[in-house]
Amino acid sequence: MMLRLVIAGTALAVAGSTLGATTSGSEAAQATSAVSASAPTAVRSSAPTPRKPPKRTYYTPKTGAKFNFPLAAKESRTINKHIRLTIRSARSGSFIRIISWNYKSALYQDALLAAHDRGVTVRVLMSRAMARQQGPTGPFARLKKGLSRHQAKRPPARRSWARTCAASCRGNSGIAHVKFYTFSNTGYTQNVVIVSSANMTEVAARNQWNDAFTVVDNQGLFNKYVDIFKEATLDRRAHPPYQTYQVNKNLSTWFLPYLGPKATGDPVVKVLDKVRCKGATGRSGIGGRTAIRIGQTAILDDRGVAIARRLKQLYNSGCNIRIAYAVVGPNIKDILRSGSGRGPIPMQQIVQDFDGDGNFDRYIHMKSMTISGVYGKQTNAHMVYTGTQNWTAVGLVSDEAGFLMNNETYERQYAATINRIFNNPPPNPHPRPLATIVPQKPTRAEHELAVELGRG
């Protein structure tokens, strides 16, 4: 299925399909291992030596970043595989809680239902509009039905379910755009939180450049995400919707909608306002200049204009900036590519249109920014601002989550990933402006996709 995003009189397509594949042999090898028993010594027999059933080998997630490169065969399922193996290693009696704007995957379904069947409490939230678009026999409906079995003997507090949110789960409008996963006990670790730009779809692996950041064994962070999940299940405005949590001096997390007493200004502009372009020291920056790398799906509307103006100011002040993007508004591109000051900011559109219809079939889906250099009072900072938020007005009032961290290892990983994407744009068989044909009767999913990118 091809979904079309309607953006200010234009259309952007996003491929969507369910891949009914089975687990590969290499993945199965990570999840299980066979252990043979020695033959009995008391009685000799010509019958085959009996074998014990395979022992379970657990996949144990670790704190750190993972990236998906759809054009690289060995890297096109990195995030998908990481999350599914974490699901498959969830211990009986544990909890899995997931919010994903879209869910459409036979592989995820198999993993989630298997976890439920072995005694894991599985709870999934997603967008109601996206679930309805799938119809009564679609992937979400099948997951919901599968999670309803084996419930009679479970107390209500331990029952599995799959539910939806009307708009944003914790706000008044917007969409349920966040994608996070929590595991109370999986593999040989506990209190796992994963935030990713990737939805629970096969398209996220085959058609998108995505990132995911995992934190393990942090009780405080895990509890905060569980609290946010519980607020989301109520499908009404939280009090307050905008919240943050400081994990330690170098790591914090944030949750939108950007509403409430502390939601003043723009969160991205506030991060950029702490940047200075000259005076980078140590192993930070490039030639003493602060370096900013951005991988972002959409920069649109008045919010995008404010962010673009701040980026242009920083570029004119000497910052080294690169932007890899899928969609930016025409007026925003005029700001970023203006010849004033130091000239145009280096930008690279990361999209592919295979059939020439003007709709994008493969595209960057990250929502990340790195800052290496002067940030606040620190002259050798290594900042990463990442999560699920598009830089659009709708992004502010939707369910979103992410991290702000100061860590050289992760900043270098994110910056290297964005540089790699920037330096290797995919071949686009039909480079052209977005299509001008708008669907006469857009579907619910098409409308919601349009809302995601700033219209609706």
Image: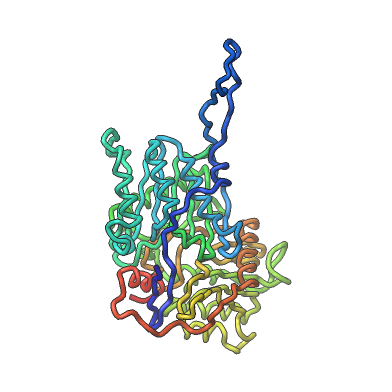
- The residue nearer to you, when weighing 43 against 178, is 43
Residue under the image location 42 percent in, 65 percent down: 16
Q: Position of residue 342 (x, y in %)?
A: 64, 85
Q: Is residue 427 above or below residue 167?
A: below
Q: State whether residue 118 appears in this view.
A: yes
Residue under the image location 59 percent in, 62 percent down: 383
Q: Position of residue 453 (x, y in %)?
A: 41, 73
Point out the residue furthest to the bottom here: 339
Is 340 on the left-hand or right-hand side of 299? right
> Which quadrant of the view contains residue 348?
bottom right
- The residue nearer to you, when weighing 330 against 287, is 330
Point out the residue furthest to the top here: 42
Number of disc labels: 0
Q: Is residue 210 above or below residue 13?
A: above
Q: For the C terminus, give its image quadrant.
A: bottom left
Q: How is the image coloured?
A: rainbow
Residue under the image location 44 percent in, 57 percent down: 19
> Which quadrant of the view contains residue 283?
bottom right
Q: For the N terminus, give its image quadrant.
A: bottom left
Q: State whether residue 239 appears in this view.
A: no
Residue under the image location 27 percent in, 57 percent down: 136
- The residue nearer to you, when weighing 444 against 418, is 444
Q: Position of residue 241 (x, y in %)?
A: 35, 60
Is 427 on the left-hand or right-hand side of 454? right
Q: Position of residue 301 (x, y in %)?
A: 42, 79
